[in-house]
Image (cartoon, rainbow, N blue to C red):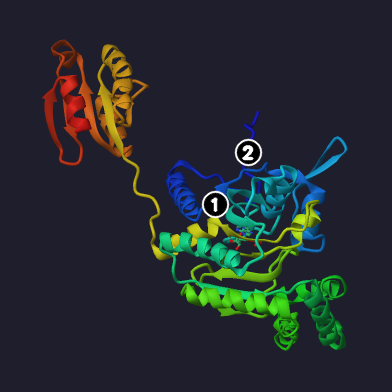
Amino acid sequence: MAQPTFSTHVGMVDILPDEVGKWQALERIIHEEAKRFNFEEIRTPIMEQTELIARGVGQLTDIVSKEMFAFERGDDQYVLRPECTAPVARAFVEHHLDQRGGTQNLYYIGPMFRAEKPQKGRQRQFHQFGAEIIGADDPAADVDIIALMMAIYDRIGISNTTLKINSVGDPESRKAYTKALKDHFRPNLSELSQISQDRFEKNPLRILDSKEEEDQPYIKDAPIITDFLTEDTADHYARVKELLKELDIPFVEDPHLVRGLDYYTRTAFELISPDLGAQDALGGGGRYDLLIEEVGGQPTPAVGFASGIERLMIACEELGIPLAEEEMLDVYIVTLGEKARKWAVKHLPKLREAGLSASMDYIGRSIKAQMKDADRENARHVIIVGENELNEEKFVLRDMKASEEETYSFENILNQLVN
Ligand code: AMP
């Protein structure tokens, strides 16, 4: 009978041991920068009720209407989370995090799921890191969120980026703008792509996000939202820009930036990299002042960003940024014979207790094969243990880089390696 073959679902990838060092290095940077900015980590389940995501992200977005990994259990309907802002908002409301006082400055790292057509920089399981400030209306919060995102990219060495910003208005500005947009598109509606025609009635703002060629001439001439902002919203936007300038964070205004999630209000931003090809967004975010109420809480202003880790990795590769240093093993014990192996099993813990990383051969390979293995593991030192060495209680310590060896007692080896 033929052996069954198994593979990952399309658009989902294994992160293999050779890759993991980069992920760990990147996660370390995210944790450190988040701490510097006084953000606390939050971890939510990867499964959420469908209704939460539908209300939060928006029924008419591509994410909710086409890309959910959805399933049922009993009477409940769930999805694998496509993003983490709605889950964080749910956790904030469910656990009354507002009672901790002040603003909640939260960040997360984890897998997200969207059933998109896979391509470079677009997977069905991908990873995001992101941060949220919940409970602040002030532009200082918008700017601190952007500064945290930029600090992470700066620290990694990705500086050739463009920060695009816009204000997508509050409900009042949006109402006036939606009307103007509809008036603009209506006379040529039949010339627009089918997707844009479908969006026209329910969510005309999303037409601006269309990539369809036939839509572009009409999008180019479309009215811009910043001409429809209420005084308050315009003032908020002006203050965000002023603070960004004061912090020397360069940005360009893109009045057609709408983002793919419906919960944004007022500030919206996106970080673009020329090193990514077609999928050029590293990350993005904005204000979502209505979301907390939408998922059952008290009206609470909030702002956040989310960034894709795979895209960040692609940018690092393009720019030749290594992210992680090569992993080294401090000591590899090469053994000859059963007794030597027993000795190694007993002495590995002593090396590890001294803070060294240490390993041995478990499967009785030849000395030559073990030396090769030590090389493959990037061992700095090898201890060679055979019959003679055991009798004399003196062992060969080989410095792999210098290709030099000396004979010592185990205690002296330990001293040598630790000091
Ligand atoms: P969004 O939650 O749509 O605002 O996306 C924020 C960031 O997540 C994007 O700028 C990308 O870097 C990343 N991202 C979104 N969708 C995917 C995907 N399907 N595959 C890989 N990265 C993604």
Discs 1/2, front: 1
Q: Is residue 228 left or right of residue 132?
A: right
Residue 164: x and y in percent read 58, 74
Out of 38 and 129, give the one closest to the viewer: 38
The numbered disc on residue 6 is 2
Q: Residues within 10 Å of mark 2 (few under 14, many from 20)?
A: few
Figure quadrant of the N terminus: top right
The amino acid pointed to by label 2 is: Phe
Q: Is residue 212 visible?
A: no
Out of 182 and 34, give the one closest to the viewer: 34
Mark pair 1, 2: CA separation: 40 Å
**Residue to which mark 1 is pinned:** 39
Above or below for 121 versus 32: below
Instruction: Give ligand 1's quarter of the image.
Output: bottom right
Count the marks: 2
Q: Is residue 240 left or right of residue 170?
A: left
Q: Residue at x 68, y 41 (%)?
A: 45
Mark 1 close to ligand 1, CB under 8 Å: no
Q: Is residue 73 left or right of residue 93?
A: right
Q: Residue at x 76, y 62 (%)?
A: 290
